Amino acid sequence: MQLLGCGQTIQCSFTVLEDNKVDLLFGLDNLKRHQCCIDLVENRLHFNRGEFSVAFLSEGEIKKNAFEAEKEL
């Protein structure tokens, strides 16, 4: 998986689910494997003990999926 905005690539395995309500779920197993730190003050996810990090998307940057759009109708 290539991390946008920082030019880094990390190796991850993914499980494809039939239910597509979530685009990507980066689980606790991957967070531990890549020694991640969730920084809610800086709004970033740090990898490999701060070696590099990526910013979280703001709510305006997250596209609504079909399930959320259905609920609003």
Image (spheres, grey):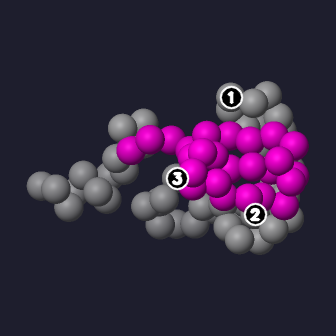
Q: Which residues are magenta?
A: 35-59
Dot 3 alpha-carbon crowd within 10 angstroms: few under 14, some 14 to 19, many 20 or more = few
The amino acid beneath tag 2 is Leu
At numbered mark 2, what does the secondary structure look like: helix, strand or loop?
helix
Residue at horizontal 32%, vertical 52%?
A: 66
Q: Which residue is mark 3?
A: 23
The amino acid beneath tag 3 is Asp
Compute the Cα span from label 3 to label 1.
Answer: 19 Å
Seen as rendered, the residue at the extreme left is: 73
Q: Which residue is mark 2?
A: 31
* Residue 48 x, y percent position in the rendering: 87, 52
Dots 2 and 3: beta carbons under 8 Å?
A: no
At numbered mark 3, what does the secondary structure look like: helix, strand or loop?
loop
Horizontally, residue 70 falls left or right of residue 17, namely left
Horizontally, residue 26 falls left or right of residue 70, namely right
* Residue 68 x, y percent position in the rendering: 29, 57
Earlier residue among tags 2 and 3:
3
- Quarter assignment of residue 37: bottom right
The quadrant the C terminus occupies is bottom left
Given residues 24 and 58, the one toward you in this image is 58
Seen as rendered, the residue at the extreme front is: 41
Residue at horizontal 68%, vertical 50%?
A: 45
